[in-house]
Amino acid sequence: MSIILDKVNHIYSPGTAYQIQALADINLKIEDGQFIGIIGHTGSGKSTLIQHLNGLMKATSGSIYFHGKDIYDEDFDLRELRNRVGLVFQYPEHQLFETTIFDDVCFGPKNQGLTKEEAGLRAFEALRNVGMPEELYYQSPFDLSGGQKRRVAIAGVLAMKPEVLILDEPTAGLDPAGRDEILDLVARMHRERGITVILVSHSMEDVAKYVERIVVMNRGSVMYDGTPKEVFRHYKELEEVGLAAPQVTYLMNELKAYGLQVNTDATTIAEARASLLEALTGIDSQKNDFHR
Amino acid sequence: MGIIKAKKLVHEYIRRDEEGNVESIQTALDHVDLDVEQGQFIAILGHNGSGKSTLAKHINALLMPTEGSLWVNGMDVSEEQNVLPVRQTAGMVFQNPDNQIIASVVEEDVGFGPENIGVPTEEIWQRVEESLKSVGMLEYRTHSPNKLSGGQKQRVAIAGVVAMQPKCIVFDEPTAMLDPNGRKEVIRTAHELSRKKGVTVILITHYMEEVVDADRVIVMDQGKVVMQGTSREIFSQVGKLKEYRLDVPQVTILADLLRQSGLDIPVGVLTREELVEHILRIAQVD
């Protein structure tokens, strides 16, 4: 089991007038190789939560175990944790600073203690994995498009070969094509490398399409934890806390309420289409066959 | 002439090396024509790099045309003496709320604009109150902007522009950094400004669901206007929209797929409600 959170609490500015309980009694088990989506409204605690997973923030109370070891133990090496749990912040391109893309991606591995050559090999591999064309490797990061910069920033984390990859809103500010690029890349990393991937997102449609498990955060607590279909069944409650199910989920539920025998578990366009054709075929697929 | 008019507008970004020699030229706007009437709600759709933000920045004279012309309320933006009046006529709301808020108290931030254009003090406070009310943020007037959500911050930024009473407001991807609720808030505010105050609104976005209620939708690609029409006309062309890398709403794609499979569903389905109606109609045929 990769990471276990046991009764984790986090309070910002404790004892002051600005005290806020950002995480309240979080219990979560993250298994190796899972592809998890974390969704929640602004202020729900999701960014706070993921920063606990690589030890960037410390729990006010409760325990966190990485492969069975307590990360708050004196002997536990937090730096090692950060090598194995990679975190890509929102707008990661803001972290780019080197004069060339290549050097920027080498930065992480170098800090892990690798030699210049080893770091270089990692950089090549990572940049290839994110689909950056070789002719751009020695360009300044600031000359790239937004989507390209983002891929370089992700390469910078991938070059450290983390076991767990956490991405905080990796598609924020990207256009649809840019978004598809990044999510397809992440999905590919998960499929080909078997790394555990945790994706924080606002977009329900994206999350439904890619992840196998969704954790819904609301006001610092875990509200739901299950497969996309299980979670989106609660679309009414999700709406009450400022979230939404994919458009097609609403559609199918509305049609069901009108008596149509459709699959209300559909969360993707393909599923909705299949279910609708099945429900309506025999009624309209042949124009001359109106009566059953 | 409408309040905004562009004729064969060209903008080139020229990159020079250290010695000033031209390294590369990027044509961001390629002979764009545009005509917007006062009071309209126009949406400009396009993927990143399509030229939509470059166009937006000409409207309030942040950028100058390389060739061609753009007039705001009859004023040619490339004439230096017009720059300030143009900016008073066309206000702008940008993508990142944090980049637009400068004061530590909401009402002071909203007052900043009117103060800078020389509005008398008493009138400033009147405008601050009215504009905060128009965006639904009056109860936060003495709050610190730091503690607000993204959607709330954007609404404060909008109030700051509204307080200067421009005839036209350009929203450059105002919801790109917001969560679903925040996005709804901002778009609703933009529509209310248009409906209740007669402000000309130009909404630049790549989210198609935000343009459903626009008077006219313009689609840009590679610096050119490639599609123009009502939202229904635009939504009818799912294939083209995907080619132009736009985010077609799930129900529109679904409706199109069902139509292609033989179901009697018209092109250009805009909303879930419409699709439900069509499906129920088909289901009850016998």
Image (spheres, helix red, strand yellow):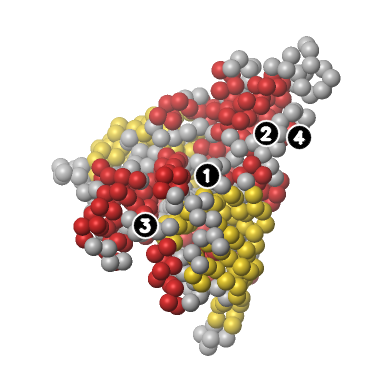
Point out the tag, 3 or 2, that comes first from the N-terminus.
Answer: 3
Q: Residues within 10 Å of mark 1 (few under 14, many from 20)?
A: some
> What residue does disc 1 label?
B210
Query: Which is more foreground, mark 1 or mark 4?
Result: 1
Amino acid type of disc 1? Glu
CA–CA distance in space, label 3 to label 1: 24 Å
**Number of the label disc, if any, that sits on residue B90:** none
Point out the tag, 1 or 4, that comes first from the N-terminus.
Answer: 1
CA–CA distance in space, label 1 to label 2: 18 Å
> What residue does disc 2 label?
B255
Task: Depth check: give the residue in front, A34 or B89.
Answer: B89
B204 vs B286, left or right, is left
Point out the tag, 3 or 1, that comes first from the N-terminus.
Answer: 3
Secondary structure of residue under mark 4? helix
> What residue does disc 4 label?
B260
Q: Residues within 10 Å of mark 3 (few under 14, many from 20)?
A: many
